[in-house]
Amino acid sequence: MSGFASEIVEQSGEHVVLVAAAVAIAFAIGAPTSIALTRRARTRRWILGVVNVIQTIPSLALFGVLLPIPLIGGIGKRTAIIVLALYALLPIMRNMVVGILGIDAGVRDSALAMGMTRQQVLWRVEIPLALPTILAGLRIAIVSTIGTATVAAAIGGGGLGTFIFRGIATADMTTVLAGAVPAALMAIVADEVLEWAERHYSV
Amino acid sequence: MAFVDFDHVSYCIDGRNILRDIELQLDRNETLVLLGRSGSGKTTLLRMVNALVKPTSGDVRFDGKSVATSDEIALRRRIGYVIQDGGLFPHITVARNVGLVPELEGWPRDKINARVSELLDAVGLTPETYASRYPKQLSGGEKQRVGIARALAADPPLLLLDEPFAALDPVTRYEMQQHFLKLRQEFGKAALFVTHDLREAMLIGSRIALLHEGRIEFVGTPDEFRHASSPHAREFLRTLDLETAA
């Protein structure tokens, strides 16, 4: 049993790594892209449309599609992280765009009229005011990635999904729960912590 | 030489002519009111002075220099801007709102603090009470006072005011108008003031420019306005008749 417990800890660690890497990549790509998109209405609709479509592909199918593709595909963590990052893009980007575009026109106007540079408007006004919405997007991305990451085990990505797939294969409910319960707990904790942050930064 | 000079300024967007061949000059230390109904183009005209809107044709000059070829950032920091709901930044305190342009200009901290206190005093807000408040903790009139203090912060020679008192209740509006006149005497700045309220225009303006569908219908002192023959000026004068009749 103690072997089981230590394996849960180990796979939980891997799970966290999968989620953290995927969300970090999605944020690194999504955040600057979103900021650029807030200034280009036509490109915005187009790009967000594509990101939206990605979201509708079932995760197992997306893993399957990527498997044979060289460099980004194949068995293992890398493919898993890429797929998870693709899913995390939508909540991150949509909330960032909505948050920044939702800022009161008078406030943005004043910022420009006071002689702020575009960078100053972005960092001193747009990002601070959009922060609660941006954090909400990050929360959705993290919580849903914790769930989706269990599927990563199907392509050898590791993580808590390992127990779930093994449990299903052996019809052993205890093993399934050994993966499902820690994943659910992780999602709940992440949700609470990020919700607190969101409230903390709202004006 | 005119302080602000609109030289044959036109503006169209989506095939609509918002402003047509505007010729208008503002002198130093003058308050020129841009009066007009909604959609007359008065706000667009105002926003051309600080390059928030660029004319389709013609030229706007501020202090002898074409706005089109000026450095926008430097230009805007020399022009105070006040809008209807104050446009205050909700995430920072009153003191930081007021001290923002000096901060952008890199003033030392203690000089900014001193200036913020001085200005809050000038607009009738006790610094000790108001400096640390956030905009959402202010009434409409207080927000507007902070907005004016913020516009004055870096001592700009020109103020642009876009219906600054329109959203206030009549009593507060009257107080703010009186206060504005007092501030004007105290600070002696040139101002362009947009309003749709003739009474306010008469009270505030050293001259009134009446805009109608993107054209200037009339320019003159409040006294001259009373005797203007333009039908659109008469329409505005009727609003005064109604008020005195009632």
Image (cartoon, coloured by chain):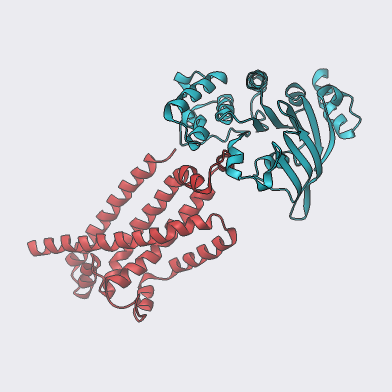
Q: Looking at this view, name the residue that lies furthest to the left.
A: A2
What residue appears at the point 74 percent right and 21 percent down from the top-left corner? B203
Rendered-image quadrant of the N terminus of chain B: top right
What residue appears at the point 87 percent right and 29 percent down from the top-left corner? B234
Relative to the observer, which residue lies in front, B45 or A170?
A: B45
What shade does chain A have? red
Residue A64 appears anywhere in the view: yes
Residue B144: x and y in percent read 59, 28
Which quadrant of the figure has residue B113? top left
Whether A101 is drawn above or below B182: the answer is below
Whether A203 is drawn above or below A181: the answer is above
Residue B5: x and y in percent read 75, 38
Residue A86: x and y in percent read 40, 66
Whether B89 is drawn above or below B200: the answer is below
On the rendered structure, is A40 left or right of B55? left
Which quadrant of the figure has residue A80? bottom left
On the rendered structure, is A166 left or right of A2? right
Counting the numbered discs, the total is 0
Q: Looking at this view, name the residue that lies furthest to the right.
A: B229
Residue B40 appears anywhere in the view: no
On the rendered structure, is A33 left or right of B33? left
On the rendered structure, is A162 left or right of B101? left
Residue A132: x and y in percent read 42, 45
Whether B138 is drawn above or below B36: the answer is above
What residue appears at the point 38 percent right and 73 percent down from the top-left corner? A62
What shade does chain B have? cyan
Rendered-image quadrant of the C terminus of chain B: top right
